[in-house]
Image: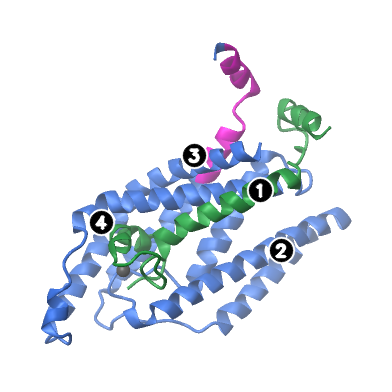
Chain colours: A green, B blue
């Protein structure tokens, strides 16, 4: 049923309100994907600053310009 | 469906971040270099506070050239793909649930909310800073405050969005936009007043370099969210005809 609605929404252009993706289908992607995305942001923005997963400061130094220019707190 | 969407969001984020890599490389690196020059000058001017062996045991792990080149590229791409992915997840929740909005309008609305709530509002309290401005002793507190401000701003914005949708269902007019927006602004004003300020800019730090750095950083974010929205909408709404042609030829 929902796939039929999605199908219709897809092919009727932007006139109709699209059928929402069922929450049950979104949730696992939101949890797993969201965690992965936040992890990536953590490594660019925080790692070897306020918190550290790896010893040393190689990750911090490598992404250092991005960290400052993206607005994360640094030194 | 949701998985494909996540992939599309990451792709749009990569495209947008390639664009801002070029921008930041041209407009962000010069003030950043000036900040590093200031830092080195300040360090050499003061007789060494550190023990000499501590200072000597600080080799350059990554060259400035790499930091400003591949380092910046890697950081910006990872950040862009991740924000694009999170954007797609937000889109998967919002699309078709915000009243009678088409996918393009939802994309634009979410990108505007993302730019305001995640970048512009937190920057009002904790603006981006070049090197030599923050103290190493306060990095923990500054990091916490930054993410508290960002989290609070996002939470309030999502609440305003959901309230706006409900009001639109019941009232159906301009009040559905003005009321939640007003509550958002008032709540943010309270948070801005309540959270402690951080100002660690050295007195002799070149003001124009600070200004240029912050302008470059914020403009970069504006370009990023605009490009993310356009790229995501373009990937999303590629004509069904083109898609079915691809299927046939594949
Ligand atoms: Zn730094």
* First-in-chain label (2 vs 4): 4
Q: Are marks 1 and 2 in contact (CB under 8 Å)?
A: no
* First-in-chain label (4 vs 3): 3
In screen coordinates, is A9 left or right of A50?
right
Q: Which of the chains bears the disc numbered 4?
A: B
Q: Is residue B225 visible?
A: no
Dot 2: element: helix
- Residue B217 position within the rendered picture, expressed as x and y whole percent measured from the top left: 39, 60
> To which residue does mark 1 refer?
A28
Whether labels 3 and 2 share one chain: yes
> To which residue does mark 4 refer?
B67
Whether labels 1 and 3 share one chain: no
Q: Gap between marks 1 and 2, in whole Å? A: 25 Å
In screen coordinates, is B179 left or right of B13?
right
The answer to which quarter of the image holds residue B163 is bottom right
Q: Residues within 10 Å of mark 3 (few under 14, many from 20)?
A: many
> To which residue does mark 3 refer?
B11
Q: Is residue B238 visible?
A: yes
Query: Where are the magenta residues, as a range?
Result: B228-248
Q: Residues within 10 Å of mark 2 (few under 14, many from 20)?
A: many
Q: Are marks 1 and 3 in contact (CB under 8 Å)?
A: no
- Residue A60 position within the rendered picture, expressed as x and y whole percent measured from the top left: 32, 63
Q: Residue furthest top?
A: B249
* First-in-chain label (3 vs 2): 3
Q: Are marks 3 and 2 in contact (CB under 8 Å)?
A: no
């Amino acid at each position: 049923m929902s796939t039929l609605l999605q199908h219709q929404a897809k092919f009727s252009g932007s006139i109709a309100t699209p059928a929402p993706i069922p929450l049950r289908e979104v949730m696992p992607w939101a949890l797993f994907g969201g965690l992965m995305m936040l992890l990536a942001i953590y490594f660019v923005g925080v790692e070897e600053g306020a918190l550290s997963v790896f010893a040393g400061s190689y990750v911090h130094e490598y992404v250092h310009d991005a960290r400052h220019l993206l607005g994360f707190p640094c030194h | 469906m949701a998985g494909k969407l996540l992939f599309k969001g990451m792709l749009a984020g990569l495209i947008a971040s390639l664009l801002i890599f070029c921008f930041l490389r041209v407009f962000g690196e010069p003030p950043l270099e000036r900040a590093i020059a200031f830092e080195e000058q300040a360090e050499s001017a003061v007789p060494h506070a550190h023990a000499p062996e501590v200072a000597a045991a600080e080799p350059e792990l990554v060259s400035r050239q790499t930091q400003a080149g591949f380092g910046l590229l890697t950081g910006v791409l990872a950040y862009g793909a991740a924000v694009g992915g999170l954007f797609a997840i937000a889109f998967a929740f919002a699309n078709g649930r915000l009243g009678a909005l088409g996918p393009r309008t939802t994309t634009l609305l979410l990108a505007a909310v993302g730019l305001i709530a995640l970048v512009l509002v937190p920057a009002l309290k904790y603006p981006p800073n070049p090197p030599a401005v923050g103290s190493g002793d306060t990095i923990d507190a500054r990091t916490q405050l930054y993410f508290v401000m960002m989290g609070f701003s996002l939470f309030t914005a999502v609440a305003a969005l959901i309230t706006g949708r409900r009001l639109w269902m019941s009232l159906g007019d301009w009040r559905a936009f003005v009321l939640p927006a007003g509550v958002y602004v008032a709540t943010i004003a309270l948070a801005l007043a309540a959270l402690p300020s951080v100002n660690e800019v050295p007195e002799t730090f070149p003001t124009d370099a600070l200004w240029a750095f912050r302008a470059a950083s914020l403009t970069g974010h504006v370009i990023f969210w605009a490009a993310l929205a356009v790229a995501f909408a373009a990937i999303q709404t590629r004509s069904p005809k083109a898609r079915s042609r691809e299927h046939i030829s594949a």
